Amino acid sequence: MNDTVSFLLSGFAGLLLGGFFFGGLWWTVRQSLLAKQPALWLLGSLFLRTIVVLVGFHFIGGGQWQKLLYCLLGFTLARVIVIRLTRPSITAPAATDIPTESKRATQS
C-alpha cells in the first residue's frame, strides 16, 4: 500500500478513536450527573475508553512511528471537533433584559 494512503488511513482511524474517546467522555459525564453511583460510571468509562484507544493505537501503529503520529493527529483533531459539537450555545441577553439607568434609579 502506498505510504500516503496508509498515513491518511491512520489519521482517519485516529479520528475515529478520538471521537469514541472524547464523545464517550461527554456522554459519560452527562450520564454520571443522573446516576446513583457516578464514580462507578466515570471509572468504568475511563478504563473502557482507555483500553479501546490503546489497543487501537497499537494495531494502527504497527510499529511505525509515522503511523502513530498520524493517528495521534487524528485523535487530537477529534478532540477539537467533539468540543465544538458539544459546546453549549450561549445566547446574548435581550435588550429588554439589560437594566438602564432610569430603571436602576426607580428601583433604589
Image (spheres, rainbow, N blue to C red):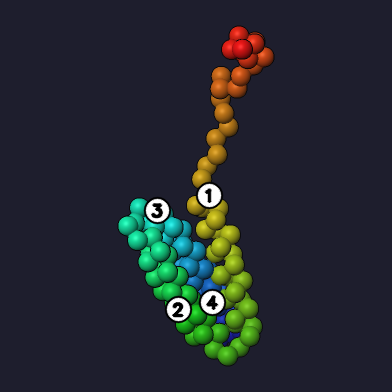
Please name the amino acid that badge 1 sits on: Arg
- At a point 59% along the width and 81% down the height, the residue shown is 68
Q: Looking at the image, do the residues carrying marks 3 and 1 touch, with CB atoms under 8 Å apart?
A: no
Residue under label 4, please give it. 9
Q: Earlier in the sequence, mark 4 or mark 3?
A: 4
Secondary structure found at label 4: helix
Q: Earlier in the sequence, mark 4 or mark 1?
A: 4
Q: CA distance from mark 2 to mark 1?
A: 26 Å
Rendered position, 31 above or below 106: below
Q: Earlier in the sequence, mark 2 or mark 1?
A: 2
Rendered position, 51 above or below 102: below
The label nearer to you, 4 versus 1, is: 1
Q: Earlier in the sequence, mark 2 or mark 4?
A: 4
Residue under label 3, please give it. 33
Question: In the displayed structure, does residue 102 sit left or right of residue 30?
Answer: right
Q: CA distance from mark 3 to mark 2?
A: 24 Å
Q: Earlier in the sequence, mark 3 or mark 1?
A: 3
Secondary structure found at label 3: loop
Q: CA distance from mark 2 to mark 4?
A: 21 Å
User: Can you tell which quarter of the image residue 77 is in?
Assistant: bottom right
Q: Position of residue 99 (x, y in %)?
A: 61, 19
Q: Position of residue 83 (x, y in %)?
A: 55, 56
User: Can you tell which quarter of the image residue 46 is in?
Assistant: bottom left
